[in-house]
Image (cartoon, helix red, strand yellow):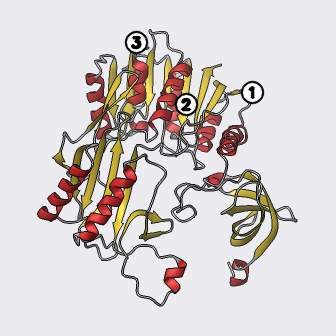
Amino acid sequence: MSKRRRNLILENIKLTSAGAKGVAVGKTEEGKTVLVSGAVPGDVVNARVKKAKSKYFEAEAVEILERSPYRVEPKCIHFGVCGGCKWQNLSYEKQLDFKESEVVNNIRRIGGVDGFETLPILGSDEQYFYRNKMEFSFSDSRWLTLDEVNSTENIDDKNALGFHIPGMWSKILDLKECWLQEDPSNEIRLAVKQYAEENNLEFFDVKNQEGFLRTLMMRQTSQGEWMVLFQLFREEKENREKLFDFLLLKFPQIKTLVYAINPKQNDSIYDLEVQTYFGEGFLMEEMDGLKFKIGPKSFFQTNYKQALNLYRKTLEFADLKGDEVVYDLYTGTGTIAQYVARNAKQVIGIESVQEAIDAATEHAKLNGLTNCTFYCGDMKEVFTEEFLESHPKADVLITDPPRDGMHQKVVDQILTLAPERIVYVSCNSATQARDLALMKDMYRVVKILPVDMFPQTHHVENIALLELI
């Protein structure tokens, strides 16, 4: 795009709706669509063009001429910088309206499906402090404000413990507060940073790959028990033990403290050996009488209360009488599978990650569920005609795929299996709609239920019930 086009300002753009990824949508006088970041539906703005496409502009708001009636004051002092809660300036009621509309529009427009019942979106009781897991990064070169960049004074305070700035992976925003995880999350993070600075512990240098402190992760249970996990770039035994002992003395809520030495180029923990310094190395979570062992590498829904609501509604949609065979595709650690198992004759779960299958098997044993069987492998390679021939026919199928949705081969096998009911749980209604379109000749969509798992963001889940025609 030319320099002239990059400096193009679109004036008096009335933003009327919300688009994908939380942008606000309006039109120019000529009728061309404009996707505007940094604004909310209802605003009238002047916007600078960032990208010019044949059918639309991508732009950012540079001046708000009229404020939307749906605007609210963001709670977090870091709003607009960290990129984590882009809808903090939009009333929660309107967040839910836009999320529900997005789901319905995707299913109708992309899926070509209509005639279904839309249940009112299930909002979250907690709009803040709803996450049970947060990860923060250390940096010796924090993100600087524009005033700091333009200042002639030397800046000595360059350490940070917080989030990566969107689009600038090497820069970390030093968090003073975060509204996503309840206390003592903020207190622990701030205490760690203060201790590290007072004791001259080296913060990580991501460019040169050196330093001591790399990442901090915190998990909590619904019972208020906490896990703290450190990734350290190198071992410094004396410094490590003093830091850990300081935290354990100051925060008795910490039930287990674990760590991993990570000299790699990335922060992924899944191929690292995690050491237990204090406690058992895991936490126990309970959901409607089921117990789950949560380790440092475990996948578990980050919004506990909404996850519980999601599982309850999934069970309700499945409408089990006790004599059904249920297939649970993309079962993960088997949470949904075990949640429905108490109401089914048999549950068969399939997942591609061996660690998740191991956890699912362990959880089933822990919960005394003898009617659950789990298989590991790529879904399109495991869920085949041979698999169907060697296992009982499913009466009900539950599928909860990743954001990309289901592979064509998986959809084809579902149609071959032809269960009476399908409960499709999705974190991406666009790919869900695409998959529903592939099944609409054999299945009708009876009803859908959008579920808001992540308030203050544009993300939304959806549960769809399909019945064989």
Give the mark nearer the N terminus: 2 vs 3: 3
Residue 316 pos. (x, y %) = 54, 19
Residue at 83% across, 65% down: 28
Residue 58 pos. (x, y %) = 69, 66
Dot 1: element: loop
Q: Which mark is residue 424?
A: 2
- As displayed, is residue 324 above or below residue 6? above
Label 1 Cα crowd, 10 Å radius (few <14 / some 14-19 / many 20+):
few
Residue 180 pos. (x, y %) = 47, 49
Dot 2: element: strand
Q: Is residue 416 visible?
A: no
- Left or right: 309 in relation to 16: left
Q: Which residue is mark 1?
A: 115
Q: Is residue 207 visible?
A: yes
- Disc 1 to disc 3, C-alpha distance: 32 Å
- As displayed, is residue 332 above or below residue 86? above
- Disc 2 to disc 1, C-alpha distance: 17 Å
Dot 3: element: loop
Outermost residue, right direction?
A: 29
Q: Which residue is mark 3?
A: 345
Residue type for callout 2: Tyr
Residue type for callout 3: Lys
Residue type for callout 1: Gly
Q: Look at the image and tell me in which quarter the N terminus lies.
A: bottom right
**Closer to us: 399 or 196:** 196
